[in-house]
Image (tube, rainbow, N blue to C red):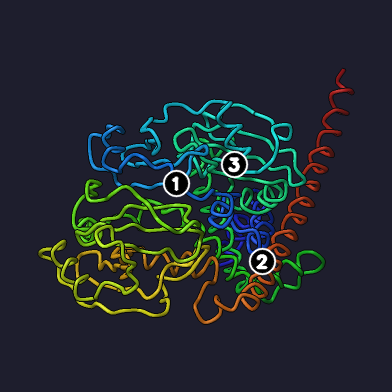
Amino acid sequence: MILFRKLVILIHRYLGIAVSLLFVMWFVSGIAMIFARGMPNLTTDVRFQRLPKIDFAKVNVTPSEAVEKAQLGRPPARATMLMVMGRPAYRFTSRGTVTVFADDGEVLETVGEREAISIARAFMSLPDAMLQYRGEQLEPDQWTLEERQLLPAHKVFVNDSAKTELYISESTAEVALLTTRATRALAYVAAIPHWMYFAPLRQNGPVWRQVVLWTSGVGVVLTLLGVVLAFTQYRTQYAGLMRWHYVTGVVLGVFALTWVFSGLLSMEPFFWASGGETGNRIPQTLRGGSLDLSQFPKPSFSSTGIKEVDFLRIQGDPYYLLRDGPSEPVLVSADSMQERWEPFTPESLVDRIKQATPGETMIDSSMLTTYDGYYHPSERKPPLPVLRVKFADANATWFYIDPRLSQVVASFTRRERLQRWIYHGLHSFDFNFWYYNGPVWRTVMVALNAGGAALSLIGVLIAIKRIKRAVKRGMRGKKPQKAQEAQKA
């Protein structure tokens, strides 16, 4: 027993010397993450605020004519109309993105420096003198690590009070990412250290993944041994920093363990939460087939506030989805041009889901008017009400369908639901009973992270003292050796 305890102490000590500073970084940045959240991005609110209204008077090309000019080779997965460089345009998404101008049918081929400056000027409503072209971005930098799909892009610096930087995607001819001096600074104290999103490391995905897995794995062993020592060393009379380290470890050790363990599992070691094949055909069946743009006449709406139009096929029928901002969009039938406000019936949704899942057993379908433990709000507000459908397949899959648009908005397998609790539940403490009460949740999370940072910082100070002591012992050992060598000489 004594030998085991000494071994645990030694392993805990030297692992602490190795990674205790990482724990300080994770806990301090965790506090910042509570307020700053993730990396800088272009929010939906800002995008729609800057997006110009569609000038339908200039639309001369029908959707079917435009998709023919796009030469996609297959029906598009998504079709949208919006203003691009001051002109109404169709944007088709299939294997890539193709933009066709709706005034004359011209296909957008390239977006160069001149076009990027023009797009930035319109977006910011500022003169060219305040815009500085910073070059073409082909590889991800610190701010496009999570937005690699927008590359290649043009980077434009705005000499305004916020020191704004814009990334204009060459494929969409639109501002796809916006950062400011404040959001960049917040990222450096929040998301970047917390997720270890240091650009040289994160640019190599496999290496970054292994670094996070191994450091968090070592952290799990370190904190687990600390919890063990909290019980085995309760009779030991510690003093000074060691006493404070023991006390904070007793109080917060289990929290630190569950936190770093859930962080490890968020990386899906061995990809344990991946998988699931049930319901792959559900989205297509709910649509009623591929998008057929010949069903849509040339868009022309009397409303002057429309900024984006989606062309949808819902249960076999064509619809326009009109957006004038981040608020709830308006659904209009392309056949009757009448607005549709009533949702599609649960019976019609269930019937189509059964068609898409032959051989699978549906064990429950219920309409939710509030969020449950898995379908819940985060940065965005997913729609309510929502139809939840449960299957008795090998993965126990649940689907959430928006009845207004007849679309799948979320799905979870059994392992994904388990991951939700052991990652988000243990890592962020987003349990329903208090997560929706923001001030209470934030207060508790700040207190716990501050305690974890204190525990780790004390560990860092102890590690520094031990390293200094070891260096001094080594220096003392060298002095007699040098004296003996001098006598021999």
Return the x and y of residue 120 as percentages of the image width and height.
61, 38
Identify which residue, 339 or 161, lies in the foreground.
Answer: 339
Mark 1 or mark 2: whose residue is earlier in sequence = 1
Task: Please indicate whether residue 322 sits to the left or right of residue 447 in the image.
Answer: left
- Which residue is tagged 3? 143
Question: Where does the C terminus fall, quadrant-wise?
Answer: top right
- Which residue is tagged 1? 82
Tell me the distance, in whole angstroms, between the alpha carbons under discs 3 and 1: 26 Å
The residue located at (26%, 50%) in the rendering is 296
Task: Please indicate whether residue 73 sits to the left or right of residue 85 in the image.
Answer: left
Q: Nearer the viewer, mark 3 or mark 1?
A: 1
- Which residue is tagged 2? 449
Q: Count the marks: how many?
A: 3
Return the x and y of residue 195 as percentages of the image width and height.
57, 51
Q: Secondary structure at mark 3?
A: loop
Amino acid beneath label 1: Leu
Identify which residue, 154 or 452, lies in the foreground.
Answer: 154
